[in-house]
Image (tube, helix red, strand yellow):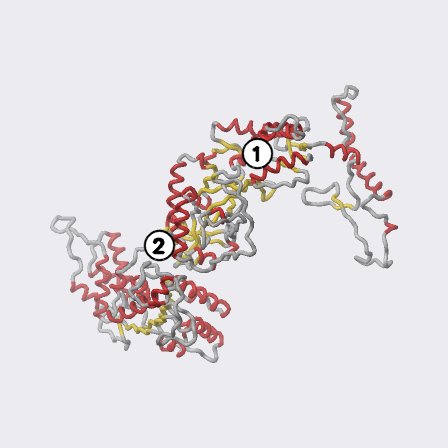
Amino acid sequence: MVPSIRSSDSNVPQGRLLRFQDAFLTNNSVSEFVWKWRCKLLGSADIDREEDLPRLTDEEEVGGDPVSKIMYEGPKSYFDSYDWVDYPPKQISKETAREHGRVAIIVFKVKDHEKRCISGRLPLKYHAIEVQNLAVVSALASVFKKQDYYISETETAIFEAPFHLLFFCQDEIKQLSAGLAADDELAPYLRLFVNTMNPILRDIHTKLNSLSGSGLISFATVWTLFPRGATVYSTDLESEFLCKVLKAEYSSLSADEQYLQICVKVIRFNGDSFVWTTKMLRLNSFSGNKPIKQLRHYPVEHHADMAGVYDRLQQRGKMMLDLQDPQHRSYNNVALHWQDSKTSTKHNVESRILVDVSGYRKYQDDSLHRGSVKRKWSNRRNEDEDDLDDWAIGAWDQSSNDYDFSDADANQPENRTFGRQITESQCQRNKEMMLRRKDDLPFLYGLVGGFALKTKLWVEFYIEDIEPIIWNNTAYSHLVYDEEQKDLILSFVQHHSFASATPASVSFASRSPPNDSSSAATEALSGKAPRRTLAPGEDVIIGKGQGLVILLSGPTGTGKTLMAEAVADRAQRPLVSLQADNLGSQVDTLGTNLRRFLTMAAEWNAVVLLDEADVFMAERDPGNIHRNELVSIFLRELEYFSGVLFLTTNLYETIDSAFRSRVSLHQRFSSLSQDARRKVWHNFLPCLAPQTQEVDGDAGAVVPTLSEADINELSVWQLNGREIQNSVKMARMWCDRKGYAMTLDRLESCIHATNPSARKGVEVVEDYDQEGYG
């Protein structure tokens, strides 16, 4: 330790003082060497002399002596790289320790390495304040409690730079000091604290005042924008939202990479209720000054259109109120898929989706959630179910600073309905509660969890881009198939959807009950547990054989896939379309994946389409154990599936007999006849834009470019439905690019280009029961 010599002492010239200190520092290593041997020779309270150490054996064995040894951080340690030595560092004397202990407040200063070094000397800056007077600590504790910061009233309190608490609470501390009576024992100590605090915060105020008029902020003072309770506007994850600040503090990934971490809370739906959840925002460091409005997160009052922000987010919040239960919607934007709690990837989703918060929490790992959604049960909870703060995370709410919510009560069930779909009455109750709290609507988060039907991923969707579905009713009418058989399949699907509906699997097409007025249907839709009676044809084992399995077999391009898609759209049901690669071909993954998809479909009352399912339905072979295991797993899961399942195959003859016995309906598709092909050509060609060409100088005249005779000529080509569709598509692109009119010759040219093996002539129709395509 460098000796403390007052530079103001007239008996010691300044030059001699500096030379003395330099000489002492130069000889510091000598002093350390002397101290080391002093400890080894004379001992200390922490070191036992070697001759006093007990020995059980004279042999040099690791761990052989029943003694412990203390190692100390040595003088050559650097940051977290420790140089361990076996003697203690030099300590201050007891007299000096007593002198330090008597003062009420200790102020610590360190060298300011961010400022210029002049003549080898760095200026000093405030590092910390330690309050040792317990009366002052007790007075400050009541102030800091409102900032959700708790200090022990029986221990000294230490506040470190950049002194967040002191800055945000300075006005209240000054009011507390000014309100004390002159003869109050606490008054001189609290005035001392205020007088000590003022110069520490003066530099911060000076920096803020110099930038206040220009709307700029520096990274060193950006934390002053985020006091507890401030409403922050953020564009995190490319979505604007409002949140309330809980705390903000600097953190770092390395010595050169610092950032401000802002802990905030937003309102999210957790599958059961609307709750406050925590979220972490991050501001990366920046050099110089930066406009506040260019920050990714900043107080909403700095926004140029604050009223517009509140209005937009309130409207979005109202949209979220209608997305509590599973909703079949359309989406066209990017969605976020989370690999872990901090890493997400963007996926383009241009398809139909299922908005399902409860399913997202059930099937997506709970550790991926960005904020805790654990319910908080309050010790102060009353009968008012509309009090959103009773479910708040954190111990604070802007509207009432003295709220005190405890952690989840061990006696209360946590996540009462998580994993089960919310009922319609719960949705309505939540909606009414939130509409009464209009000031909270803008704080509803802008992302909602759900399932992308095309990519088969659980993702988070941007609420603004979720749109209603436009049902494709023309697909059913364009399906070239026996009308009676089409109606039969549609009726079975519609009836099964209603008959199996439960409070956990509701209709997406309509909230109204079906025409069936039976008591069982009424009880099922009202949420009551129906009386358990064995229906005609039902399996005697409860839970078995309740699914509707429809097998569609036939050659490629005859309309099997379109049948499932068209029926699902006409029934206004979600369609979960699966391929073999979605399920996997390994025994240990097939059962899990298949059960997962079938369970989700049953919860959504969706139609499942397993396209090209031959690999799972093939006849079992004693010589192929792996395939036999796959077939057995598929049979087992199919037995207990309660929804609607379409299976398509090109190889009916190879299907295992056990599958045939489990099929509810079997529709066989034949190759398209000429008459069927004519209908398919008619279905596709009217979808083209009107054709125009020049007639007698009239460039805008509309003329028929394809006659009925041309359609008859096209139907002679032996093509399946998919090949016809592809030929029309290519011809359309060619004619649009060149400005040609659609003609028979051009269509036939595209037939040759897309399917060189196609030929005209009378085909031999395979011996199938029905023919069809759309």
Which percent across, then down, holds residue 766?
Answer: 28, 76
Placement of 163 over or under 426, stated as above or below: above
Residue at image location 35% in from the left, 74% down from the top: 664
Residue at the disc numbered 1: 169
| Left or right: 347 in relation to 138 | left
Amino acid residing under circle 2: Ser
Local SS, label 1: helix
Q: Nearer the viewer, residue 359 or 725?
A: 359
In this view, 11 is above or below 117: above
Where in the figure is residue 68, as x and y percent of width and height? 79, 52
Mark nearest the camera among 1 and 2 is 1
The picture quadrant where one finds residue 508 is bottom left
How much space separates mark 1 and mark 2, taking CA atoms? Answer: 49 Å
Crowding near the residue tagged with mark 2, few <14, some 14–19, many ≥20 C-alpha atoms within 10 Å? some
The image quadrant where one finds the N terminus is: top right
- Residue 219: quarter of image: top right
Q: Residue at x 68, y 28 (%)?
A: 121
Residue 257 at least partly seen? no
Q: Quadrant of residue 22?
A: top right
Measuring from the top left, give residue 331's x and y in whole percent: 36, 53
| Residue 224 to residue 377: above or below | above
Q: Residues within 10 Å of mark 1 (few under 14, many from 20)?
A: some
Q: What residue does disc 2 label?
A: 330
Task: Between residue 174 and residue 359, name the one nearer to us.
Answer: 174
* Identity of the residue furthest to the top in this view: 10
- Is the residue under label 2 in contact with that under label 1 (CB below 8 Å)? no
